[in-house]
Image (cartoon, rainbow, N blue to C red):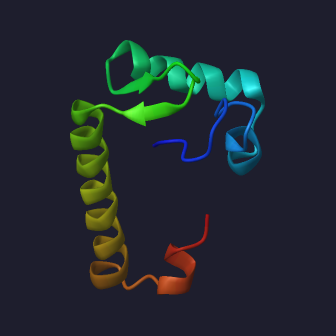
Amino acid sequence: MSATSGGDIIKHGAPEKLESSKASVSLAISKPEKKKLVRKDEWRQVFLTPEGERHALMMLDKCMLIQDFLTEVLTVDKEIRLRP
């Protein structure tokens, strides 16, 4: 998770994209920050650490496994599976 444009990620889009308040986004970022999974730079942009990237890739692998299980084993329609 990284901010690609300059400025504070909390002020520039993250709360709107997540449909959350700035306080909620700050709290959500503080937990992985304490675990050293993300870091903030001098402009308060948020970046994954190498450990955070490994953790994120493991989570993506698990999500893909669950998606495959839903569509291949339980034969859930792909359109239903992709809904938020």
Foreground pick, 31 / 78: 31
Placement of 18 over or under 80, stated as above or below: above
What percent of the width, then of the height, locates residue 15?
73, 39
The answer to which image quadrant residue 72 occupies is bottom left
Is residue 50 left or right of 27 when viewed as pictured? left
When the figure is inspected, residue 46 is found, relative to residue 3, above or below; the finding is above
Q: Position of residue 11 (x, y in %)?
A: 75, 32
Considering the image in quadrants, where does the C terminus appear?
bottom right
Residue 6 in the image, given as x and y percentages of width and height? 63, 38
Q: Tell me which residue sits at (53%, 25%) in the image.
A: 29
Give the farthest residue toward the top: 34
Q: Nearer the viewer, residue 49 or 64?
A: 49
Q: How many marks?
A: 0
Q: Where residue 31 appears, x then y in whole percent?
A: 46, 19
Q: Say left or right for 51 vs 76.
A: left
Q: Quadrant of residue 32?
A: top left
- Determine the residue positioned at 66% across, 29% down: 8
Residue name at image x 31 percent, y 56 percent: 60
Q: Quadrant of the N terminus?
A: top left
Q: Residue at x 60, y 19 (%)?
A: 27
